[in-house]
Image (cartoon, coloured by chain):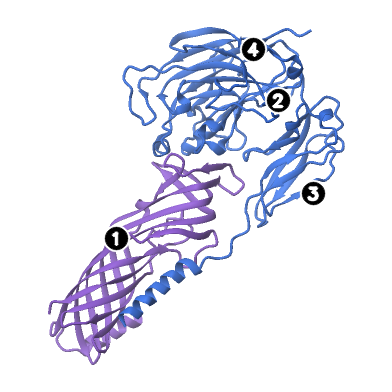
Amino acid sequence: MQSSKLIWVIILLCGCLSSCFKEEPLNAECDIESVWVHTDNPDDFFFNRTDTIINVPYSKSEITFYVKRNSDITHMAPMFKITEGATIEPANGSLQDFSRGPVTYKVTSQDKQWNRVYNVAFQERSRTVTDTLKFDFDNYELDKEYGKFYVWYDKNEDGKTTYLWATGNPGFRYAYSTMKDPDRYPTTPIAEGIDGASVKLETRSTGAFGVINNKRIAAGNLFYGFFDTKYVLTETMKSTNFGHPFDKTPIKFEGYYRYKSGDKYQDKNGNEIPGKKDQGSIYSVMYRNHDNAGNEVMLHGDDVLTNPHIVAVARMVDVTGTEDWTKFELDFKYFDNIDETLLNNYGYNLAIVFSSSYEGDHFEGAVGSTLLIDKVRLICKKTE
Amino acid sequence: MICVLLIIATITANAEKLTDNLNYNVRLGYNLGGTAPIGIPSSIRGMDSYDPGWNLSYGFDVQKDIRGPWGVMTGIHLENKGMEVDARVKNYHMEMVQGGQRLEGYFTGNNVVNVEEWLLTVPIMATYHVGGNVKLKLGPYISYAMSHKFYGHAYNGYLREGTPTGDRINLGNTEEQRGSYDFSDDMRRLQFGIDVGADWYFSKRWGAYADLSWGLTGIHKSDFKTIEQTLYPIFGTVGLTYKLK
């Protein structure tokens, strides 16, 4: 009696826990994971073979192929790798005319419950005309998707809006969901600058999530590049993609800054290191964006100053306290000559990095450390 | 349950003096089971590991034979119900919560759940002597959770924030890379359910017993919606009983 009862109990429990597993639900996701185009003469269209394929970050729905001037983009047939089971409209691989602007694609999930809309564009890479690039950080807005934090943009020489500056604000949003005030994010605009607005980078505590995931601080940062939120918890260093293709030879990196170190410098585990002062980071890096095998090279948090493809660096050594706006003027130190052909074919990336805590990428620094930045200039070699 | 109460009521109404011929026994058992939804949703794909934990049940019961084979039993049990489950999930709606900060969305990957409760339980059961030394038991129980913990973490996967089209955040397998939650404060203290079991005396004083207690209340408060499915405690108990009188 006793043992048969026990068997009953076990059968009931096991039955409940295992045989009740239902059939696998259909996929609910509907992402374009990558997109590529095949042409017989890719060199006629693209500066680099790698420009024919784009791995699409999950947070992005605008996809742009950069092509050479006067490329015939009236008959392009992009191929898409999408979430398994999902469908795409217009059809995968269908011929489209991109000369009239971006083409909108709609991806519908396998379970038909969800969809995402993407815009795919083919755009000429416009030449940098001016010899001095000016970044005044007067153009900012709340991010379009969440309206919770600030993003910065520039107006191109041809009037187009470009979003080439990135911050860690999207990552901070995950840690601080209750933060309603965009001005309490690590990277914010402030009204008073050298002229017009300036950017304020402030090292912030990441709260309870920061403690449990041992990422206790978020340094304020602003960089020429792209922030990939996918990696904020895992390979955090990979979330900062430093650099965009650049077709000029930078000579000087200038601008204005103010810096104040926070009171208590803490290590990764949140323990105070008495006597240690925080510092900011200000540097710019030029690097080859392909390796010898033709693979794309992107600098991240762990190699932005050490990657072997770096050809030049302009770096401020001690970014310490200054009460007033102070000018920085840094010369690019070249480790390698610039290959003009490669330069004209966008074979180099330029990265510019500002951070309120120089060891913030390792989650070390002082909460409250503040770096203000304004009127940044990148002076390049004159081209005839 | 009403049925059982009626039976008990009828039996006791026809009974002699209530305190006559009482049997006292103490018991020590091992609780094995889990808290689970009734009808596992398709978003839960499988179980990678299950640790029943070391759940003990100490009990003191009073039993009285009333008429023929029928009787009643009640008592007080101090027991621990817990488990740790590592489940594989796909597009499973969940929320990571820490210190008031929350991150909600659809998670695909592995999800570890730890449940730990210390309960004071009072069963009220009808007993039926089937012959030999075996008594069957059936009746409701009521439990008061003196301590309760419900916590866990999502790992080796990714969360789509808000909806399956939202931002994707990868989760790894170290403490620094996973998403943790703790819903201990959202658990209810008063629980009830149905207990069914059997006592078998193999000697004059010593016996063995097996019970199944099926919770009819979820372990969380009814306004707790973060976990879409209500989780019910379903535990089996096996152990020894000793007749004091």
Question: Pointer 1: what residue?
Answer: B54
Q: Residues within 10 Å of mark 2 (few under 14, many from 20)?
A: few
Q: CA distance from mark 1 to mark 2?
A: 63 Å
Asked whether residue A157 appears in the rendered view, the answer is no
Q: Residues within 10 Å of mark 1 (few under 14, many from 20)?
A: few
Q: As shown in the figure, which amino acid type bears the numbered disc 4?
A: Leu
Instruction: Quadrant for residue B130, please give it.
Output: bottom left
Q: Nearer the viewer, mark 1 or mark 2?
A: 1
Q: Earlier in the sequence, mark 3 or mark 2?
A: 3
The spot of residue B51 in percent (x, y) is 37, 59
Q: Are marks 1 and 3 on the same chain?
A: no
Question: Residue at (39%, 72%) from the top-left corner?
Answer: A10
Question: Pointer 3: what residue?
Answer: A91
Q: CA distance from mark 3 to mark 2?
A: 30 Å
Question: Pointer 4: what residue?
Answer: A378
In the image, is A376 to the left or to the right of A175? Answer: right
Question: Pointer 2: what residue?
Answer: A161
Q: As shown in the figure, which amino acid type bears the numbered disc 2?
A: Thr
| Chain letter corresponding to the colour purple | B
Q: Are marks 3 and 4 on the same chain?
A: yes
Q: Nearer the viewer, mark 1 or mark 3?
A: 1
Quadrant into which the N terminus of chain B falls: bottom left
Q: As shown in the figure, which amino acid type bears the numbered disc 1?
A: Trp
Contact, CB < 8 Å: mark 1 with mark 3? no
Q: As shown in the figure, which amino acid type bears the numbered disc 3?
A: Ala
Question: Chain A's shade in the image?
Answer: blue
